[in-house]
Amino acid sequence: MLKILIAGGGTGGHIFPALAIAKALEKKAAVSLLFVGAKRKMEMEKIPQAGYKIIGIDIAGYNRTHLLKNISLPFKLLKSFWQVNQIFNEYQPHAVIGVGGYSTFPVLRTAQRKGIPTFIHESNSLAGKSNQLLAKKAKYVFVAFEGMAKYFPAQKIIISGNPVRDEIIKNQVPKSEALKYFGLSTNHPTVLVLGGSLGAKSINQSIAENIGLFAEKGIQLIWQTGGNNFQEYQHLAKGIHLISIQPFIEKMSMAYSAADIVVSRAGAMSVAELCIAKKPVVFVPYPYAAEDHQTINAQNLVQKNAARLVKDAEAENKLVPVILDLLQDAELQKFFCKNMAELAQLNAADFIAEKILETIQ
């Protein structure tokens, strides 16, 4: 049996591609899978929930806000390499896959030092520094966008698209069932608000300030606030039957089926899922993402007449009017859905799994 180790996490944008690749590998071969993540990060909860074993290591990123917290960083890095070495000695993987996140660097670097084949998945149009370093000795670098040769050796790049979970690709949940799951009615338009897995301040504040307006107009909300912000906003749902508010939505297939339109950040994985879900979207890109790549992601869809874009700095005044306008324009919603569907990449996880397996078998 092939033993494959998957490293990475930190956000849903890293965790869900990893899970999609894991499921595809299991479909195609007899494999044993082990995940490695960073202690106290969301992968330590989400990976076991999906049925996989994960080991946490003591790794952290550079803190640009509180510089004094970086004093312990070299010690954590050294400790993480020691921990990873112990994992390798015990598990002895045949291959290692990195999907981004703090744990990727020590795990893939250790594998490369031991001569174990490594593979990288880079979901964004802007490659992280760790992945750029690791790519030099990787077998393949799977990417979602063209023009990535400025970051990685051209001969190692394979354009695969971003792997999306089967539950999204094969979603056939009826809208009525999905609305019932969230305790909502079939008689009202429904907006899915995705404040991100960690929380999106501008989106959350704009929605919070207009809860009364949505209720007055009979508009339902499924609102994911992010775990960091849930306590701040959960009281707003009291007494309003048109709102389902939660820190994190586990069953995104239900959420997509229930929604008439979606409000979302524009991370690469969010974009990939929304294209497959074929939903009209208002993107509010996170402006502090490296080189503002979320804005580039969103603009790509806007230019293809597949979505609307509201700048983060303008969300307080413009987001809700744009939502209301889109809700009132059924033809534009259909137009957006059609154009989103044309951009969907359905087979990325299977393609990546096949390439990895044919390399190591």
Image (spheres, grey):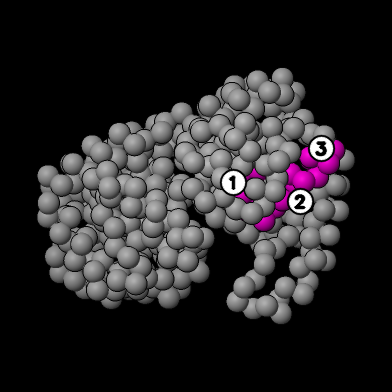
Distance from the alpha carbon under mark 2 to that under mark 1:
20 Å
Asked whether the viewer can see residue 22, the reply is no
Q: Nearer the viewer, residue 57 or 61?
A: 61
Secondary element type, mark 2: helix
| The stretch drawn in magenta includes residue 108 | yes
* Disc 2 packing (10 Å; few <14; some 14–19; many ≥20): many
Q: Answer whether labels 1 and 3 touch (C-beta < 8 Å).
A: no
Q: Percent x, y for residue 357?
A: 65, 24
Q: Nearer the viewer, residue 298 or 24?
A: 298
> At 80% from the left edge and 66% from the top edge, which residue is drawn?
74
Which quadrant of the rendered structure holds the N terminus? top right
Left or right: 248, with 207 as reference point: right
Q: Percent x, y for residue 87?
A: 82, 45
Mark 1 or mark 3: name the one nearer the start of the chain.
3
Q: Percent x, y for residue 256?
A: 33, 46
Q: Quadrant of residue 344?
A: top left
Residue range of the region highlighted in magenta in the rendering: 97-114
Q: Percent x, y for residue 254?
A: 36, 45
Distance from the alpha carbon under mark 3 to that under mark 2:
16 Å
Does 113 appear above or below 262? above
> At 12% from the left edge and 44% from the top edge, which residue is drawn?
331
Does 162 appear above or below 183? above
The amino acid sitting under disc 1 is Tyr
* Disc 3 packing (10 Å; few <14; some 14–19; many ≥20): some
> At 24% from the left edge and 62% from the top edge, which residue is drawn?
242
Distance from the alpha carbon under mark 1 to that under mark 3:
31 Å
User: Label 3: which residue?
Assistant: 91
The amino acid sitting under disc 3 is Tyr
Mark 3 or mark 2: name the one nearer the start of the chain.
3
Marking on residue 280:
none
Asked whether the viewer can see residue 195, the reply is yes
User: Label 1: which residue?
Assistant: 151
